[in-house]
Image: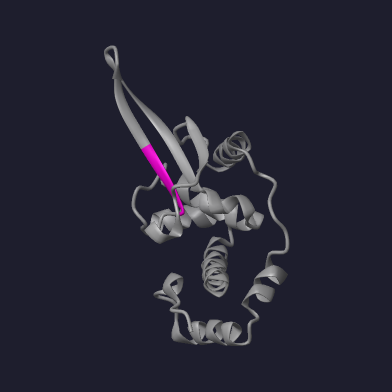
Amino acid sequence: MTALKYLGGYPPALLDKVRLLIERDELGAYLEKRHPGRHEVQSDKALYAYTNALRQQHLRNAPGIDRVWYDSKLDVIGKALGLHTAISHVHGSRLKARKEIRIAALFRDTPPEFLKMIVVHELAHLKEAEHNKAFYQLCEYMQPDYHQQELDLRLYLTWRDLQAARSA
């Protein structure tokens, strides 16, 4: 039995349901039923357009984003599924900051809800640096079922680890 490392902090009753799905080998089928498709945002250019469209729709007053890309160096092992950075540099007499968002490459092959969840998460950091109540309220504003999608993503990561362990 695998440790439910992505599900820390969830109630014991929920963890018991997840363990039961794993024992019955039904977690993959459960996820496929809830999230049957895969998104079409495959290139870095398409990811930038997708992210910027979400920013324009929900965060018009937030700073613009200079670059968004899939990063194959980000992985769940380092507990980073996405990163937002602001790189400041002096340009003449002005201080300029580049806003960048990196999304783990594993999101190229996930359902659209998972990509949206991670992009929404990183966009929320444009307004709220910390993972506080205001941050999660902003995430819910941009994706009303944010918390459910986060749980489903954690289940997907658990399933993915199970698949990797079986093939090893």
Residue 37 shows in this picture = yes
Q: Percent from the top left, x then y, of residue 168?
A: 53, 70
Q: Report the number of discs.
A: 0
The vertical placement of 8 against 73, above or below, is below
Q: Residue furthest front?
A: 168
Q: Residue furthest top?
A: 92
Residue 116 shows in this picture = no
Which colour style is shown?
A: one colour
**Residue 42 vs residue 61, the one in the foreground:** 42
Identity of the residue drawn at 47% across and 30% down: 66
For residue 149, which quarter of the picture? Answer: bottom right
In magenta segment, residue 82: yes
The vertical placement of 55 against 9, above or below, is above
Region of the chain picked out in magenta, as a range = 81-85
Our reading of the magenta stretch's main secondary structure is strand
The vertical placement of 92 against 76, above or below, is above
Q: Percent from the top left, x then y, of residue 67?
A: 49, 32
The vertical placement of 55 against 30, above or below, is above
Image side of residue 159 versus residue 130, left or right: right
Identity of the residue drawn at 50% across and 54% down: 139
Identity of the residue drawn at 30% across and 24% down: 89
**Residue 59 vs residue 105, the one in the foreground:** 105
**Residue 96 vs residue 3, the one in the foreground:** 3
For residue 88, which quarter of the picture? Answer: top left
In magenta segment, residue 154: no
Image side of residue 147 versus residue 77, left or right: right
Q: Percent from the top left, x then y, of residue 129?
A: 35, 48
